[in-house]
Image (spheres, rainbow, N blue to C red):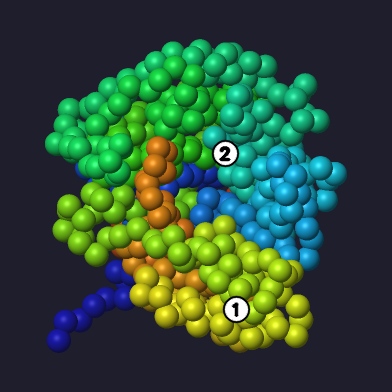
Amino acid sequence: MLALSTAAFPANAKEAAAPAAVAPKLIVAIAVDQFSSDLFNEYRGRVTGGLARLGKGVVFARGHQSHAATETCPGHSTILTGSHPARTGIIANDWQNPRAARTDSAGKPSYEVYCAEDESLPGSNASNYTVSPHHLKVPTLGDRMKSVFPGTRVVAVSGKDRAAVMMGGHDADFEIWWDGKSFTSYKTKLADLPAGLAAVNARATAAIAKPAAIRLPADCAGQVRDIPISTSMKIGRLALRKPGDERGWRATPEFDALTLDAALAAFDELKLGRGSGTDVLAVSFSATDYVGHGFGTEGPEMCAQIHALDATLGRFFAALDKAKMPYAVVLTADHGGHDAPERNREDALPEAQRVDAALSAKSVGAILATRFGLADSALLGRSAFGDIYLSPAVPPEKRADVLQAAVAAYRQNPQVAAVFTAADIVAAPAPSAPVDEWSLLDRVKASFDPERSGDFIVLLKPYVTPIPAGGPGFVATHGSPWGYDRRVPILFWWKGMTGFEQPNAVETVDILPTLASLIGLAVPSAEIDGRCLDLIAGPASNCH
């Protein structure tokens, strides 16, 4: 029997722990839109810049956007709130409100609500709206800091308005996004935008106006091959972007580079991290998402994008280092992504397929309208999956029968994995298993809001891409409850830390309480869904 002297071990292990966590003057929260754990793991040994630095910190390679509705708006709503979409109220990029008819841009009746609009404003609709955090039901990290710490400044910058709003929250100093023509902010604040933003916008205008060919890194050469999407379209080769193609420009590394320049303009003007308090700079890079949608995740287009993102992040960290203040970084994603089914079928996934157009809410709703003698479609919904609603055309006395028929129709389809009614979801207990062991019902419950969610929710089977036919800019997507769309990296770094790898699953809702622990911000556990992650290697802990 081996005898161990108790003198060899401290009475309180915490006293002999590694140095305490950094006390940052700046929290830097980075979201890379559609940057799945699969992409991170595929490229982490092939990069040398900012991603390589983060890979030497604390790495949770199997982070999770826990919920089923793996879209941009709900995903971003979890990152700095500590809450699932069921609590944030951001159940999807858009949803339907059958109780409040509006008109769309063409003057037709519409029930659609955009996640980052204030639909109470006159004339607003889901495609022509005033950007607002109106629908976000909870505070962000920056909101909480501002309510407690005098002097805190909060800036959120993104290629997409919804990403900036969901990370910036209700009380940000600047929430800046690309609106299709320029980096802008709330219209009432235009005069107060950082002076350096004008030069960024001038460079963006010039970039869009000229043709551009993306340089293919040597590392990506093996991924070049033609993948036919239709008789008139192929992906798998870096194509020359036409002058004036703004949408195509978003799917280039230059979009991320200029998003960073917009963030640095605010960083410099406000001198973030160099004031009396601790500040927040949240940046969401959108180009990876546009590349994933337009070309899939496994071609040379994505390879070039990840290498460019790595360089952009390296430039970001160099600018932060030059400012000589202590900062802490977290990087994650709003959701994952899946490759185009045409390439998946060539690459050992023969079951990959596109969704049948007959599964759309419009198509099924028309059949039910005829069956039940309704004047208009029985269903509201933009797609063949996710939240689907009974339309106002269904009278009260027929609602139960129409709901039953709709659910049965979807459940009988061979591309559908499960259908849950609102009653099913409300009755289900809160998830209690580790997040990677959650049932489909658990995942749906995490993004269910009884005020906003559908009368039923449809989940497609794995590898069914919910795009009936691929076309320019949209050959692949996300949004499913499956691992490839839920798994995202969660990476923490600060200067001097001891890094480690934790392969077990954690959640993006764990980010807020973890960052709060670094700055001494108390967050009542009953107000959030996440938990503090211990980032200190050894027996010490930043969590208290």
Local crowd at mark 2 within 10 Å, few (<14), some, or many (≥20)? Answer: many
- For marks 1 and 2, give the CA distance: 41 Å
- Disc marking residue 371: 1
- Disc marking residue 457: none
> Element at badge 1?
helix
Nearer to the camera, 163 or 533:
163
Point out the image quarter for the C terminus: bottom right
Local crowd at mark 1 within 10 Å, few (<14), some, or many (≥20)? Answer: few
- Is 127 positioned to the left or the right of 295 in the image? right
Quarter of the rendering containing residue 211: top left
Label 1 close to label 2 by CB (< 8 Å): no
> Element at badge 2?
loop
What residue is shown at x 67% (from left), y 51% (from top)? Answer: 114
Tell me where residue 380 appears, x and y as whole percent. Answer: 63, 64
What residue is shown at x 17% (from left), y 52% (from top)? Answer: 346
- Disc marking residue 160: 2
Quarter of the rendering containing residue 26: top right
- Type of residue at label 2? Lys
What residue is shown at x 30% (from left), y 26% (from top)? Answer: 239
